[in-house]
Amino acid sequence: MPRPHWLPFLVSKCQGNPGRRALCDERALDIFKSLWLRPEKPTIAACYDDLKQIAKAEGLTVPSQRTFARWMKELDPMVVTLARGGRESLKEMLPAQERDRSYMHALEAVNADGHKWDIFVLWPDGTIARPMMACWQDLYSNLILSWRIDKSENTDVIQLALGDMVEKWGIPAEAYLDNGRAFASKRLTGGAKTRFRFKVTEDEINGIMTVLGIKIHWTQPYSGRSKPIERAFGDMESRISKDVRFSGAYVGKNPLAKPENYRSRAIPLEEFLKIVSEGKPPRHRCSGEGHIGDDYQWSPD
């Protein structure tokens, strides 16, 4: 082919006029958007059928279904996610925050939470129940500083774990907690100005964390982005809860994930505590820089 003919052969063979927009009444477009941007997440076809009925009654000009589908792709993805998926779905679109921990030092800040193990345990009183662990973690090193086990999340077990941490490692400067009833109790955080739970009074007695001078930050419950200990709990479930010695006592992470040998046995409390104490964490230390929420380390005995 002669070189002068090359350029014409590269011209688009599209028959439409790219500079021309299909005719559509503004009201029809607004109606279609309101139909499609619903939490029920209807399909384009279903919205188009509904629009045609409205357009027929009101005499509106409506282009083809494919045209509406193309126009919906032009909408801001964040607007579409917020309207059809809600605020939680919108949050998932935002990238996780990266924090540099190189400026920190050990015990500059800790975080704590409660974790319910997916294990059936036989308690000394003969009852069978899943244990709850109150756990404190250092934010600089991800080291699990202390933990205690009980049948439920309560202020007593949290305070005991806090005492273990202070006795062995010292008093942290800051702590990140969620505002659950146990962690935000007045016995622990009384006197804190921003507790977000229970009535704050001027004459209330200071809690133990307030007395120790620990600055408290409140976080969102079940938020691994704000509390890296949530990530540590996930590692514990994958590395410890599925230990071969827990076979038959493991219940699964939810009712739809029950193993075939579900509730075939319950492990005695002493044996459960022994296995948990071993830890089985990833054995490498944080370099001091990276994401909050990296692999945890178990506190040495």
Image: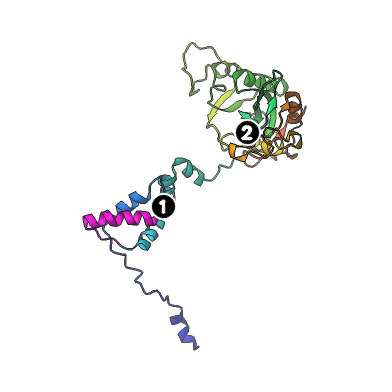
- In primary-sequence order, the first of circles 2 and 1 is 1
Main secondary structure type of the part rendered in magenta = helix
Segment tinted magenta in the rendering = 43-62
Q: Is residue 110 visible?
A: no
Q: Which residue is mark 1?
A: 76
Q: Secondary structure at mark 2?
A: helix
Numbered-mark total: 2
Q: Secondary structure at mark 1?
A: loop
Kind of residue indicated by mark 2:
Ile
- Tell me if mark 2 has few (under 14), some (14-19) or many (20+) residues whose alpha carbon lies within 10 angstroms of its own: many
Is residue 53 toward the left or the right of residue 179 in the image?
left
Is residue 25 toward the left or the right of residue 270 in the image?
left
Q: Residue at x 22, y 55 (%)?
A: 57
Q: Nearer the viewer, residue 186 or 28?
A: 28
Residue 143 lies in what quarter of the image?
top right
Residue 45 pos. (x, y %): 38, 57
Residue 183 pos. (x, y %): 57, 23
Q: Which residue is mark 2?
A: 229
Residue 100 lies in what quarter of the image?
top right
Quadrant where the C terminus lies?
top right
Residue 5 pos. (x, y %): 46, 85
Is 224 situated above or below 113? below
Is residue 203 toward the left or the right of residue 232 in the image?
left
Is 120 situated above or below 200? below
